[in-house]
Image: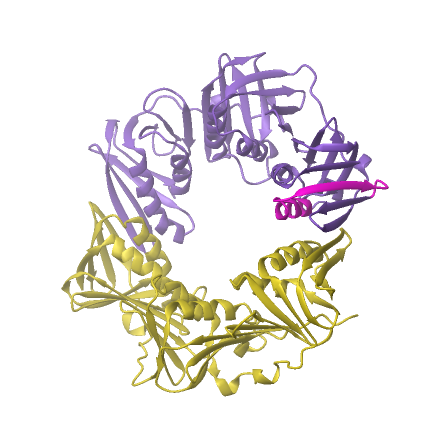
Chain colours: A yellow, B purple
Amino acid sequence: MKFSCQGLDLADAVLKVVKAAAVRTTNPILECVKIVAENDKLTLTCTDLELTITKVIKADIKSEGTAVIPAKFFAEFASKISGEQIDFHLKDDKIMEVKYSDNTAVFQCQEATEFPAPHTLDNPNYVDIRSDYFRDLVTKASVAVAQDDSRPMLRGILVEVEGDEIHGVALDGVRMALIRKPTEAHSAEFGIIVPARCLLEIVRLLPENNQVVRVCTQKNHLEINLGDTVLMTRLLGMKSDYVSYHQILPTNFATEINVNRQHLLDTIDRASLLARAERNYVVKFNISNNQMVINSESQLGNITERLLITQNGNDLVIEFNGRLYTDALRVISDEFIKISYVNATNPCVITPTEGDDFLYLILPMRPM
Amino acid sequence: MKFSCQGLDLADAVLKVVKAAAVRTTNPILECVKIVAENDKLTLTCTDLELTITKVIKADIKSEGTAVIPAKFFAEFASKISGEQIDFHLKDDKIMEVKYSDNTAVFQCQEATEFPAPHTLDNPNYVDIRSDYFRDLVTKASVAVAQDDSRPMLRGILVEVEGDEIHGVALDGVRMALIRKPTEAHSAEFGIIVPARCLLEIVRLLPENNQVVRVCTQKNHLEINLGDTVLMTRLLGMKSDYVSYHQILPTNFATEINVNRQHLLDTIDRASLLARAERNYVVKFNISNNQMVINSESQLGNITERLLITQNGNDLVIEFNGRLYTDALRVISDEFIKISYVNATNPCVITPTEGDDFLYLILPMRPM
């Protein structure tokens, strides 16, 4: 194996694929990057068995071959010689000699055959979606993903294709996010649970310009092919393994308000400062006379703020964990939002003032 | 106590003084900010008993008084209402009522008399120095300050005024920094040991434009008055308490080289990547024929790089902890530097190619 490439191309590629390399594992091969020189192209792959990222770059291949070397270390090294042309030469399948300017580095290689074999999808189902919609869906849904490991399925986002829509659903026991976006095309309806961290990593690698991306799935895998970069992730399960979230959605609202999102966010943000000191984040909302009074108390003092709202229905006093609100309000971009309440003990629902692009459900605190 | 001020002025001031507030202490009053309304001015003070920062801002004082409230919390609060005019009203010396727009916050105050009394200097010694020189002196010396607590004096920088020069000295057992700058004026020669963290905090608050600052000292205190902002720090000791650093400086060099600083930094940076994996950071330097070969090895592989240098004197093979070199080379801005060696077991000395603006002394690794 012998090839030359530009340091800038190499550094860019390694820094992208290294995101899929395992960190602190008992299996060192998962902390490595596999480098394949073949057909005038260099293919770099990292995988932690859940997420796999592959990136292809141009290279001048003098002889084909495969080498496996520590990924994090190689990424740092590559980024420090990105300005130069680099010549690689694999010797005895064990030693990778790297020449740049007048300098030489030599890296010990791992056994290439031990690197996990790539998984390929054969005639998968697919959905085509605009990349900006996909990014929005993942970003907004990930707010409600569970952070602990007690129920592994809840570390994922349920991605559903139904009719001409794609849905992203996440919930963690005290809140739920449901995001709806239109699709461009799809092969069949399906519902899969995808690890949220993998979807967030995919979103980071999506191109900035809006183009249609094809999300493919087959058995327990999801794949997105962005041309030079291919991302593959194992699924956590299928729709049938997930919570029946439709049953949680409240109906029969007794109070509905319209409120400026940024004003509400700023207000809860300040109120949460005090609530944070008590480590319970309780913020009290008092709705009446087209006004919302937001109040929090702690040993440090108390904060009371007033917001003008448009109110329909009953007056209401209700307490929430302020953080659940601010998490959701930060990822929404609408100027005004609608909040619908059943009563002081049932979940409230945050939606756009028009349409059903997103829905956040938040459980109130139980009155002590 | 009753006053109004602009949120932006207040937020800026609190965020500056809060740097001197104690973190995680058994004495909660040291985590507070003292707010004094007097003579149409608001004076904010934080102190952890080592560093004290005081800042004065304009305010519309309706009645004078003093309040003491938790600093970190108040800084966050102030930064979240920086766009508004704020009205303060202290009630019963215990409750601070804060009004902004239509909103009200109420903070519990601490007992103002418990806040440490300010220390004032009476007819102190002083040295006047250009602020850019002072910043450079502190930044370059702080590289060699000890990070552990085993010898408290070494957590400080020795600041010496001798003749028309000010010196900054720091050492930690494996390296030493000695920075020399001209002064504009001084009242007397002196030598004091100042906590490095306080000097770094002072440097952060120095104005960007180059002006002459007066550093005052008396007994065990140092004070810098920047007009609206006054910084005071307790000293760790006097010059007589510090290591006699002149005795450490080697003479009789057998090898001297001139080298491009950035090239040397980049090279050691790459070599340290491998050395880091071994956690010993050993980088080997081989000087001969106007060339420096830099080499490091670990289980991952090895790196060998060549640098053109101007060599005077003997050939030399010597090993260093690469980090000690990169720390120093990063804060130097000269294009070329001079390195002088005695032999493989004595410290080397990094200096400018002309002048004596800075001197770094670095101990080599002992050959095993």
Residue at (59, 16) in percent of width and height: B126
Image vertical order of residue A211 relative to residue A185, above or below: above
Quarter assignment of residue A50: bottom left
Magenta segment includes B73: yes
Instruction: Judge from the rendering whether residue B57 lies leftward or rightward of residue A211; answer left or right.
Output: right
Say which quadrant the N terminus of chain B sits in: top right
Quarter assignment of residue A232: bottom left
Instruction: Judge from the rendering whether residue A349 lies leftward or rightward of residue B99; answer left or right.
Output: left
Q: Is residue B309 visible?
A: yes
Q: Is residue B248 visible?
A: no
Residue B36 x, y percent position in the rendering:
74, 33
Residue A50 or residue B286, whichever sits in front: A50
Residue A337 or residue B258, whichever sits in front: A337
Image vertical order of residue A227 relative to residue A272, above or below: below
Highlighted magenta segment, given as a residue range = B72-94
Image vertical order of residue A360 relative to residue A191, above or below: above
Quarter assignment of residue B35: top right
Say which quadrant the C terminus of chain B sits in: top left
Residue B61 x, y percent position in the rendering:
75, 32
Residue B354 x, y percent position in the rendering:
33, 21
Count of marks placed on residues = 0
Magenta segment includes A222: no
